[in-house]
């Protein structure tokens, strides 16, 4: 019976030992040529290495490389067992991994290439997160599509907000108004162009300037012996004016038309002929001019009212002593104001005129 209970106790102790070893994991390691480790307990502890006691709750046993069986007894009962492959660690680099915008990274670490023990643990590097920047949009034109504004990560390029296409606008043609030509500037026919981009669909064609259309002109300044005259022309289309010089042409004496004249010395006899009856109220103007020895010039005018016939004798058409007679002019007309208008107008209006020198 005593032997039976001893067997039962051994089986229970073995089960307890197996379960403890599986549950507790590895407690001992090989470092710098020594087997090191510990077992924490309130009871009495013995640590055995390859069948020999090495210490109690903590050991540091020098040992060459090799395989060792380590057993722990608590209160003389086996509670832990470990097979240790004792060797010098051969470091193998565990490469790091850069963190990205969305994934964490790792620092560089190392492990033993023989047993796999971690020699330098790798640490996690938090994900960076996106760095959002704007993606500029593009306006649509008449012929090319555009894009809306978007967003992307400046670091990894991931599109956060996609750009959307804006359809091309298409041309919007409007009329180019025609321009009428003027006298001096060219015009143009109507055309067509896009009011958005300016593209010309129908190009205007030039219409030449029409040029001025001048009227017959009017005398705006009479020509005299001292100054040329001026004739002004006006464009009947635009109203622009131009002037031309009118040369002075001295009046030539005309044959008397309403009278006959005889001169005897300083006496001038005027006889109205039958044609004088056409005059309503005949007047006779006598103008004579002379120059004194000192160069002073004198002119005199006399007016006589005449009948439709008869002879008039006009005396005193003489000159002072030493003076030179320049001319004697006789005018017969029916214009009482002719005296103030002068010889040139009398001749221009075809009145009877005679001159003597």
Image (cartoon, rainbow, N blue to C red):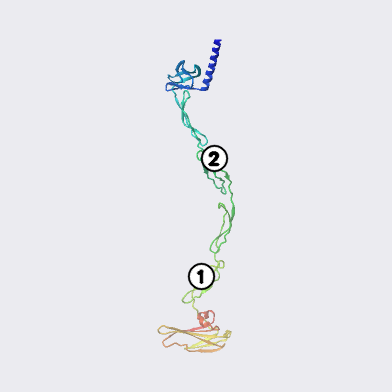
Residue in the picture at 52% in, 73% down: 220
Q: Which mark is residue 175?
A: none
Find residue 95 and report its horizontal and vertical position in percent: 47, 30
**Residue 137 found in image quarter:** top right
Packing grade of label 1 (10 A; few <14, some 14-19, many >=20) is some
Q: Who is closer to the viewer here, 58 or 206? A: 58
> Which quadrant is the N terminus positioned in?
top right
Q: Is residue 253 visible in this depiction of the protein? A: no
Packing grade of label 2 (10 A; few <14, some 14-19, many >=20) is some
Residue in the picture at 54% in, 14% down: 9
Give the SS element for disc 1: strand
Q: As drawn, which residue projects farthest toward the left? A: 294
Find residue 241 and report its horizontal and vertical position in percent: 53, 68
Of labels 1 and 2, the one closer to you: 2
Counting labels gives: 2
Does residue 202 lie above or below 73 as drawn? below
Does residue 109 lie above or below 277 as drawn? above
Does residue 234 lie above or below 324 as drawn? above
**Residue 15 found in image quarter:** top right
Q: Is residue 19 visible in this depiction of the protein? A: yes
Find residue 197 and report its horizontal and vertical position in percent: 55, 51
Relative placement, left or right, of 238 versus 317 is: right
- State the separation of the CA atoms marked 1 and 2: 79 Å
Residue receiving disc 2: 159
Residue receiving disc 1: 243
Residue in the picture at 53% in, 89% down: 311
Q: Who is closer to the viewer here, 62 or 282? A: 62
**Residue 33 found in image quarter:** top left
């Amino acid at each position: 019976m005593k032997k039976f209970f001893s067997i039962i106790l051994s089986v229970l102790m073995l089960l307890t030992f197996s379960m403890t070893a599986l549950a507790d994991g590895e407690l001992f390691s090989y470092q710098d040529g020594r087997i090191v480790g510990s077992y924490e307990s309130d009871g009495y502890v013995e640590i055995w290495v390859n069948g020999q006691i090495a210490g109690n709750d903590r050991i540091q046993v020098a040992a060459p490389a090799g395989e060792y069986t380590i057993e722990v007894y608590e209160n003389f009962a086996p509670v832990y067992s470990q097979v240790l492959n004792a060797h010098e660690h051969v470091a193998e680099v565990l490469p790091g991994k850069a963190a990205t915008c969305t994934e964490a990274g790792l620092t560089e670490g190392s492990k033993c290439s023989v047993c796999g023990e971690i020699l330098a643990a790798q640490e996690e590097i938090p994900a960076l997160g996106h760095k959002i920047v704007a993606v500029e949009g593009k306006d649509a034109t008449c012929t090319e599509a555009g894009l809306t504004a978007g967003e992307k990560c400046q670091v990894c390029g991931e599109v956060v907000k996609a750009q959307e296409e804006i359809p091309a606008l298409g041309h919007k043609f409007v009329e180019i108004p025609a321009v009428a030509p003027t006298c001096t500037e060219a015009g143009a026919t109507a055309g067509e162009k896009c009011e958005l981009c300016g593209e010309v669909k129908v190009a205007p064609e030039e219409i030449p300037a029409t040029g001025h259309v001048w009227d017959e002109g009017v005398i705006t300044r009479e020509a005299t012996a001292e100054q040329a005259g001026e004739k002004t022309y006006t464009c009947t289309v635009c109203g622009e004016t131009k002037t031309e010089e009118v040369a002075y042409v001295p009046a030539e004496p005309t044959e008397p038309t309403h009278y006959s004249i005889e001169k005897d010395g300083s006496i001038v006899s005027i006889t109205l002929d039958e044609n004088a009856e056409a005059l309503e109220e005949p007047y006779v103007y006598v103008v004579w001019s002379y120059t004194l020895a000192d160069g002073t010039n004198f002119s005199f005018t006399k007016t006589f009212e005449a009948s439709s016939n008869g002879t008039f004798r006009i005396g005193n058409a003489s000159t002072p002593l030493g003076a030179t007679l320049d001319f004697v002019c006789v005018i017969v007309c029916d214009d009482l104001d002719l005296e103030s208008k002068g010889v040139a107008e009398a001749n221009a209006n075809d009145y009877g005129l005679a001159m003597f020198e």
